[in-house]
Structure formats: C-alpha cells, structure tokens
Image (cartoon, coloured by chain):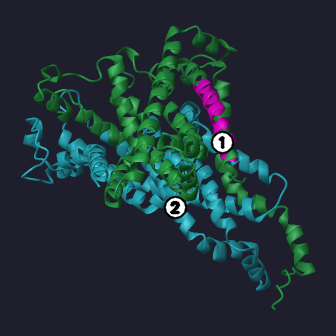
Chain colours: A cyan, B green
C-alpha cells in the first residue's frame, strides 16, 4: 500500500513536469502584459485577460495566417486522401505484376528525408511559378503541392488495411447488380472506409499544419501568404519579445492539433504516429 | 448438419470482363498518386543528385554565368572542409544523445506506468499526449520562454533557490548548453511515442508467461531482463530506429532555438547546414551535396527499419 502511494506520487510529480510547459504557455497567454514584462514569477494569475489574444489577432493579423494554414492543410487533406485512397484501391483489390514492387516503393517513399529535398523543390516551385503563379513560390499552392506529395505515401500505407478489409463478396454483389468498377469504388468502398479516411486526413492535417521548413523556404516575400509557424517566428524581436503575444499565438496553433490527437490517440500506439513529428 | 456454402462462382462472362479491363484499371487508380509522387518526390530526388555535381551558385541561378559540371567537386570541397566534419560530428552526437534520452525517459516511464494507479496513469498519458501534440515551432517558442535569461521561470526558480549565477544566464550562449536545451525539448516532445508503444508492448505480454517464470523462482530483475526484454525486442527495435530517423532530421527546433545554427554556427546539424549553405550563402550545389550525404545516411538507417518491420511480421 505504501509502495503504491510512493510510485503514485512519483508518477504525479512526473506528470506535473511533463505538463508544465503547456501550462506555462496557457498561463502566460492569459497573464496581463505588465505582469509578464515585470517577470512575475507567480504560477497563477488573479487577473486573467484575453488581451494577448486580442493583440495577436487584431494587431498582428494572426487570423489571416490562421486562415492560410487552415486552407493549405484542408487542401492537402483532400488531395492526398483522394490520391492515396485510389492508389490503395489499386494496390489491394487488384492483382498485377508490379504490385509488390510498388508497395515496397511506397514504404521507401515514406522514408525519404524530405528536408533534404528543399533545394530541388525550391527550384521546381520557382519553375512552376513562371507558368502557373498560384502554384509557385510565394503562393500557398506551392505548399499544397509539396505536402500532398509528402502525406500521400503514409496515407496509402494506412488506407491499405481499411480498403482490404471490405469483403470481396460485396464487390461481387455490386458487379452482379450492374455497378461498374468506378461506381463500386465511389459508392460502396469509399463510404465503408470512412474511419480510415478520417484517420489519414488527421495525420495529413497535422503534418501540414506543423511544417516550418517549407513554409519559410517557399514564402519569401509575400507576407500575406505566410502560414502560422512562420508568422509566429516573426513575433520574435531581439530583446523586446512580446511573450504574451507569442504564447497566445502558440496556444492558437497548438489547440487544433491537440483536439485531433485526442481523436486519433488509439491509432498512435501502432507506430503510425511515427511519421507525424517532423 | 449444415454443409458449408459453396464458394461464390463468378459467371464466365464477368471473368472475361475482369480480365479484359483488369490490366489497365489498377493503373487508372494509381495514376494520380504516381503523378504526384513522381513529380514532387522522385524528380526532386533526381535533381538533388544532379545539382550536387554542378557548380550552382547565385550567378548561375540568375543566369549571369553558365552552369558548369564539376563532377565530384562539391563532395571534394565538402570532405576537405573541417566545418563539415564538425557538423557531422555534432549531428551524430546530438542525434545520439536525443535518441538515448528519449528511449531512457520513454522506457522508464512505460515501466512506471504499469505500476501506477489507473487515475494517475490516465493523467500521465494525457500530459504526454499534450507534449506529443505540440508542434515543433510552438514547443520551441515555449522552451525559449521557459529558459529566457531574465523572464524565464527556470532561471527565476534557480535564482530563488540561491543559485544567483543563473540570474540572466543565457542557455544558448555556449555550444553544449544550447544543444542540451534543444535536446530537452526534443526529448519532451518525442518520449510519449516511445512510452505509449512500449507500454502497449509490456501490456501485450501474457501474464501466464511472467507467472510461470516467477513459479520457476526467477527474481523481478531476472524476469525483466530474461523474459520481458526479449519479448519487447521488436517494439524496441521500432522505437529506436524511428527515433534515430527523427532525431537525425531535426531542423525546426535547432533553427528556432539557436537562431539558425547558433553563434558562429556552433550548433549546426546536417539539415540546417545544408539549408544555410544553399539559402543563406547561395551555394546550391554544395547544399545539395550535403543533402545527398544526409539522404544516404538516413537510407541506411531506414533499411534497418524495414528489416525490423519485416521481423515483426508486418505483411507487404
């Protein structure tokens, strides 16, 4: 009994340490600016205020970057899930010669260190921008393109199991009812794999949402097209950091990911979570 | 007694239809994914290798000077540069320390979690989930605030405890202190993956096995090393290699917390080095050569990962 008590209090202490950075982030976002600038060390505040959030959203135009981030992530979710779902159908419900090779290639594609591709992708986007400006440098389209490519291999890998789980008999039944292959895939298979689609969408969303490297490389001079991570970094000013604003921005950026994590937490343990942190 | 239903027979005409259209159909479904991956993953990879063999700097980008093939020139320059070797050593030491720290913290907390009361465990997992979910950018921002020389709670607490030397102490000023700061952030946000995976692994060990060992007179320590550890080996292999892959590629945390690679580049790791060479110094050819080296190193690690996965019984 005493031993249990001791391990439990050790566990609680560790929990506090792990949770402390997030607690401090939220606390500092709610503290009044004067208290922050005076270096108030109190781990609580008696006068919580949304002032920092107001400053971030109104003065720094954080809402715009939030919208940019949401837009890019949503577009990536739709594009990568669509590509991956169709590819998963081909790789699980058809037997053809290069199937196994393609599967191995999908697995290897997941492991390409995309950070190393920054330089060629930068020039690729520059080239694309010369003919289609919306998809080139300084436009959000460039981020949609690269993140769709980065998210697709993992999404194929995850959706594969869901698509394969739909029984063959269902396919045969819909054949007999006169449905073509495309009708079957769209009207029967897609709705049945909805849970998998939701899970892969969340992973694609988080991956895109968190990206800093490509956002800072591709959006060079168009400040209005920046995404959250880069905008947050621009709050840092030597020696006069507005920590309240930085922490409020951090809260706004962390919250959606946290909500999604709670949704997918069951799948995280199976090793799929591995690809999320970049 | 019911006889099992005969297998569903596909009518001959339909089989013919399957056979006829079956050749092209999978490729139709594959087309979008192949196009995207080909254009934005395979082609850039090829370009990366290609550019690494060229003298490709700012004048060549603007077209003021023609492109020049220089073969292994960039690689020779790289291998002859003492800074490259220092960066490589930084990367290996830093990534190695991050992996060791993550595994040690994650592993011991997984073991601790099995002994906690359910409500404490739930709290611990919730806190870990929060750390896990925090984006690298916000995590780095929070860390910079926590360890801020004058306004950060860490220095304030240390000073209040009588260690006045920490008043206004900068954690990013010296090389290894800065690396240590980034390391603590990396461990904080990546130990949950290890903890959750290993916890699930420990829970999956049948209690009969442990009981049998105990009946045979094995001590707790012996059970841990001779029974549980071998059964956890596949899960251990996966979390280890996965951690190596992540920690080798860390860019955001180093870039933000040390201000792009630290004072005089003391905190550069391979990815940040390649980025700085290309986008700050305009040495795109040299940057690409660094990228190729990084990719090859990671490929070797990834192949080990593949083999571990296969041993775990993941079907292709």
Question: Which residue, given by chain and number where applicable, does mark 2 sit on?
Answer: A199
Q: Which residue in the rendered view is the most extreme toward the bottom?
A: B1
Of all chains, the one bearing label 2 is: A
Q: Main secondary structure of the magenta part?
A: helix
Q: Nearer the viewer, residue A89 or A162?
A: A162
Question: Does the segment drawn in magenta span residue B292?
Answer: yes
Q: Is any atom of residue A253 visible in this view?
A: yes
Give the secondary structure at mark 2: helix
Closer to the camera in the image, B69 or B141: B141
Q: Nearer the viewer, mark 1 or mark 2?
A: 1
Left or right for A45, reference B22: left
Would you say the residues marked 1 and 2 are in contact, meaning their CB atoms lie under 8 Å apart?
Answer: no
Q: Is B23 part of what is drawn in magenta?
A: no
Which residue occupies the foreground of this view, B300 or A127? B300
Classed neighbour count for the residue bearing mark 2: other residues with Cα under 10 Å, few (<14), some (14–19), many (≥20): some
Q: x, y (%) of residue A170?
A: 72, 79
Query: Which residues, given as a range, are shown in magenta?
Result: B291-310
Indicate the position of residue A35 as horizontal and vertical percent values: 8, 41
B15 above or below A70? below
Res. B308 mark: 1
Report helix, strand or loop for mark 1.
helix
Q: Position of residue B27 (x, y in %)?
A: 77, 58
The residue under the point 33% across, 23% down is B178
Quadrant location of the N terminus of chain B?
bottom right
Q: Is residue B128 shown left or right of residue A78?
A: left
What residue appears at the point 11 percent right and 53 percent down from the top-left corner?
A48
Counting every numbered tag in the picture gives 2
A258, B234: nearer the viewer: B234
Measured Cα–Cα span from mark 1 to mark 2: 25 Å
Instruction: Report in which chain the residue with disc 1 lies.
Output: B
């Amino acid at each position: 009994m005493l031993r249990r008590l001791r391990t439990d209090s050790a566990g609680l202490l560790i929990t506090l340490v792990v949770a402390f950075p997030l607690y401090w982030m939220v606390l500092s976002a709610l503290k009044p600016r004067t208290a922050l600038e005076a270096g108030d060390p109190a781990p609580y505040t008696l006068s919580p205020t949304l002032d920092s959030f107001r400053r971030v959203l109104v003065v720094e135009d954080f809402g715009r970057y939030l919208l940019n981030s949401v837009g890019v992530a949503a577009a990536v979710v739709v594009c990568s899930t669509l590509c991956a779902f169709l590819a998963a159908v081909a790789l699980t419900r058809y037997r053809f010669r290069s199937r196994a090779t393609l599967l191995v290639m999908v697995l290897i594609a997941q492991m390409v260190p995309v950070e190393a591709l920054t330089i060629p992708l930068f020039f690729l986007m520059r080239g694309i921008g010369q003919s289609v400006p919306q998809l080139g440098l300084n436009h959000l389209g460039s981020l949609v393109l690269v993140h769709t490519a980065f998210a697709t291999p993992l999404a194929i890998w995850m959706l594969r199991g869901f698509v394969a789980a739909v029984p063959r008999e269902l396919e045969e039944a819909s054949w007999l009812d006169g449905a073509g292959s495309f009708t079957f895939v769209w009207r029967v298979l897609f709705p049945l794999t909805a849970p998998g689609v939701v899970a892969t969408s969340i992973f694609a969303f988080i991956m895109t949402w968190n990206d800093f490297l490509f956002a800072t490389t591709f959006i060079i001079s168009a400040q209005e097209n920046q995404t959250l991570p880069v905008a947050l970094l621009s709050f840092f000013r030597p020696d006069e950091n507005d920590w309240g604003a930085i922490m409020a921005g951090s809260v706004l950026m962390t919250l959606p990911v946290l909500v999604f994590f709670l949704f997918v937490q069951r799948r995280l343990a199976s090793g799929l979570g591995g690809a999320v942190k970049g | 007694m019911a006889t099992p239903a005969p297998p569903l027979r596909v009518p001959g005409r339909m089989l013919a239809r399957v056979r006829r259209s079956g050749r092209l159909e999978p490729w139709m479904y594959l087309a979008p994914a192949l196009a995207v991956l080909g254009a934005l993953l395979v082609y850039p990879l090829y370009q990366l290798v290609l550019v690494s063999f060229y003298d490709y700097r700012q004048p060549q980008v603007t077209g003021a000077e023609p492109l020049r093939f220089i073969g292994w020139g960039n690689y020779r320059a790289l291998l002859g540069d003492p800074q490259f070797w220092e960066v490589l050593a930084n990367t290996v030491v830093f990534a190695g320390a991050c992996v060791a720290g993550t595994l040690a913290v994650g592993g011991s907390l997984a073991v601790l979690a099995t002994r906690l009361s359910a409500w404490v465990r739930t709290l611990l997992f919730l806190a870990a989930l929060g750390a896990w979910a925090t984006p690298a950018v916000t995590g780095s921002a929070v860390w910079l605030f926590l360890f801020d020389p004058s306004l950060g709670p860490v220095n304030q607490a240390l000073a209040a405890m009588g260690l006045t030397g920490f008043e206004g102490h900068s954690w990013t000023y010296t090389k290894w202190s800065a690396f240590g700061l980034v390391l603590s952030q990396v461990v904080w946000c990546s130990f949950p993956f290890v903890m959750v995976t290993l916890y699930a692994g420990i829970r999956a060990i049948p209690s009969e096995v442990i009981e049998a060992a105990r009946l045979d007179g094995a001590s707790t320590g012996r059970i841990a090393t001779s029974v549980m550890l071998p059964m956890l080996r596949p899960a251990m292999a996966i979390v280890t290699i996965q951690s190596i892959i992540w920690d080798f590629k860390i860019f955001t945390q180093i870039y933000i917390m040390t201000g792009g690679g630290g004072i005089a580049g003391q905190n550069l790791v391979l990815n940040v080095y390649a980025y700085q060479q290309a986008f700050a110094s305009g040495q795109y050819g040299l940057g690409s050569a660094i990228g190729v080296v990084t990719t090859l190193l990671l490929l070797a690690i990834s192949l080990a990962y593949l083999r571990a996965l296969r041993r775990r019984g993941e079907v292709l």
